[in-house]
Image: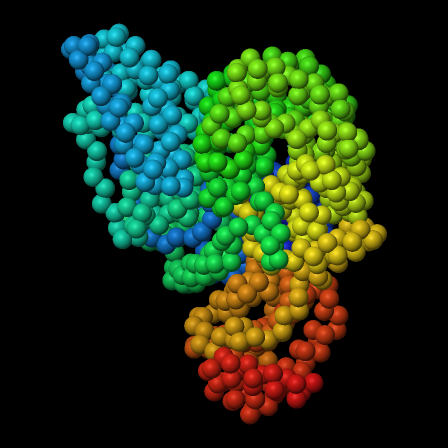
Amino acid sequence: MSHSLTLICPLPNGIHARPASRIAEFCAGFGAAIRWRNQRNGQWADAKSVLSLIGGDILFNDVVDIEIDGEGAARVADELGRFLRQTLPCPRSLAELSPSPYFGQPAGQGVAIGELCVHRGFRMPEPAELPLSMDRDADLVALAGARRALAEQLRQQSERQGGEAAGVSRAHLAILSDPDFRARLDAAVADGAGPARAVAAVVVHYRAQLSKSASEYLREREMDIRDVGRRLLEALAPEIERAGEVLPEAALLWAEDLAPSELLALDRDKVKGLLLARGGLTSHTIILARGFSLPVLTGVQRAAIADGIGRTAVLDAGLGALFQSPDTVVLDYYREEEALLTAQRQRLAKASGGIAASADGQRLELAVNIASAAEAQLGFAQGADGVGLFRTEMLFMDADEPPGEDEQFQCYAEVVRLAAGRPVIIRTFDIGGDKPARCLPAPQESNPFLGYRAIRMYPDQEAVFRAQLRAILRASALGPVKVMIPMVATLGEARWARSLLEEERAALGVAEPVPLGIMLEVPSVLFQLDAFCREVDFFSVGSNDLTQYLFAADRDNERVGNLYDSLHPAFLAALSQAAATVHRHGRWIGLCGEAAAAPHALPLFLGMGLDELSMSAPSLQECRRRLRELDAGRCRELLGRALECADGAEVRALVAAEARPALPMLTADCLMPDAVWGSKAAAIKGLVDRLWLLERCDDRYGMEEDLWLREQAYSTGLGHGFAIPHAKSGHVLHPTLCLARLAQPVDWGACDGQPVDMVLLLAFNAADAGAAHLKFFSRLARLVMHEDFRQALRAERDPERLLALLRDRLEGAA
Ligand code: PEP
Ligand code: MG
């Protein structure tokens, strides 16, 4: 008997060690042979072997053919399919509860529990449903009046709202005052449409135009135009009815799509989460939702939720999953999850507010990398000090024609307005290498990263480059803007770019010079840096490219990935010398490649005295928090030692040892004498969550998995109602003993068959535990054999006294 099935890998990080071991463990339970073939690379893997599965190099969205031969093949295919689609993407403690998730496209983080309901929103009427003009002059006056009134409303809103909501109001104001938008409305009335009909017709026009755009960002602007149109219609044709919305106290609201103002109009006390059939990740609705910390799932069709409407559901945006009519164990799991995420948000907010500086006051600007205004909004919501890299090539990629000067100006202006006085570094288009654009064709090359790319292309595309410079210069009237040129290798290139910038500035009559900088990403610049400092105003290290060119290792080629290391001492030496030279000339130097947010890098960059780090928005808060814990003097000294290391691994080990001041293994906040968890899985989750919250573990799902691996080999229930789950895990940051006393004993599969009410979790780091882990475990296990110890532990409810008791007994047993 044989059977086959196909899987599209749903895991964002592919089938790495952890999921591979879960798959192998699941498959080992069947007698049939199970083999996988990755369609992308043709690799075969034995699904019962962890190493074989990892060797299949299965990445996110890879298509895998699975062949099952032997006993009960059809049943195995059925069960395996369910496991792979429903269980595998869930963290272990959730998978243990056999949930039935529906997966969509996650947008943002967070979980929400509520009643599934359908949004009854506004329907944009077709133009033909609305009246023709009766009196053109009067209609033109009515239209102008409605526009003025809405503009005033939007202006007031933007002043009142602040944050993302103000940004959306400003964007809508820009649409309302856009000359093309206005001209089309007036022309429609002049052609005989009544004012409401003119609005509907113009919305239809833009929908048709933008829906064809190759740029997802521009496609998503359609929603904003529709929103402005809806508000004009409300004024011009109040008879168009808006269905009333009656929401339950906690709603998970489904909508086909949702305009930003519709989201703003919702009762946000009641709407806990959003499910959208449409809505891309850069749409303003999504940005706003993220700003309100509303979990969102997109790509959810109405049919998928039809049976759950009016019932309780859980939305887990991090996982991208919706659980309809979940049973009580899944609900309890998510109630815990809600409480945990709230506690974590509060902790982070408390620790990350204020100015970005080290503990001893050395300032390090933390800026955001963006490719659109939407991302700028996100960055500023996370406290970015500016935009450190605006990758404008995203406006060119996927377009048939290079974007015009006006279109670019609108985009840059939106970002500069959002920045509200903070600096914005706009990088001119970096097409080529791994970023081809059909609107700027390049020849086929055998080494595109070493070829016709970025500034090397500009002389052939001078008109396009000049148009971009003009758009940037115009935007500079609205706030502090800087121009940055990618891939500069020679002084001649920098001088040429400067001359064009100055020519365009003179032609436009822009009085204030706009600072001109270069990406420091081609190694030749490092060796002529004194001269470059006299030519340009600032530098931003493109660590992605500088690393690849320094080590001659393609940034996208995993085979040479071991050579590509932005923490290698050679790279650090290049950077620290560059920072010193640039500062000697009184110039400014930032860094905007991926290394800016790399774990371990922050103390070294602070030690070098870089002026700025620019990274994607989600990394900002955590980076600011870590920065505040660092001492710049010690980081300079640490950098000195890092430069003496032989390779990147040594640097990482050095920083890790330094960055982790020893924490005691046992503190009062690791002790939970009144835990209410209803199962072994819930207890393991609860204990690991506590480790994570206390920053003793960096990946709670990975940590859980490591603990479960141990439980699979043998139960850690030692008898007498005690369990000591333990693991040596790469996810443990500090060795920890965590205790929970469960109000209700749970089944642990203990050796004496008795339920467990006392759980002592032992966590050691895989790299530095040595034999300490086993020694500690046996010391603890010996103590548990004594009845007086068990009784004393059970009787003590005060965490401080419990701490003293445990310390005392553990020392006594050492
Ligand atoms: C870099 O090279 O580090 C950089 C920020 O630019 P990109 O990744 O766009 O080449
Ligand atoms: Mg680069």
Residue 23 locus on image (x, y percent): 62, 53
Q: Residue at x 38, y 56 (%)?
A: 326
From what the image shows, is residue 485 above or below residue 559? above
x 39%, y 30%: residue: 171
Q: In this view of the protein, which residue sits in the foreground, 393 or 416? A: 416
Q: Is residue 520 left or right of residue 711?
A: right
Which image quadrant is residue 61 in? top right
Q: Position of residue 179 (x, y in %)?
A: 37, 16
> Could you say which is closer to the camera, residue 217 or residue 513?
513
Q: Is residue 379 left or right of residue 454?
A: left
The location of residue 792, given as percent across then percent down, is 52, 89
Give left or right: position of 361 versus 283: right
Q: Residue at x 53, y 76 (%)?
A: 668
Q: Is residue 114 above or below residue 746?
A: above
Taking the view exactly as shown, the residue that stands out farthest to the bottom is: 788
Query: As drawn, which residue projects farthest toward the top?
Result: 191
**Visible residue check, residue 28:** no
Towards the viewer: 225 or 727: 225
Quarter occupied by the C terminus = bottom right
The residue lying at 16 percent from left, 10 percent from top is 135
Q: How is the image coloured?
A: rainbow
Quarter-of-image position of residue 774: bottom right
| Residue 710 found in image quarter | bottom right
The spot of residue 441 in percent (x, y) is 65, 16
Count of numbered marks: 0
Q: Is residue 516 visible?
A: yes
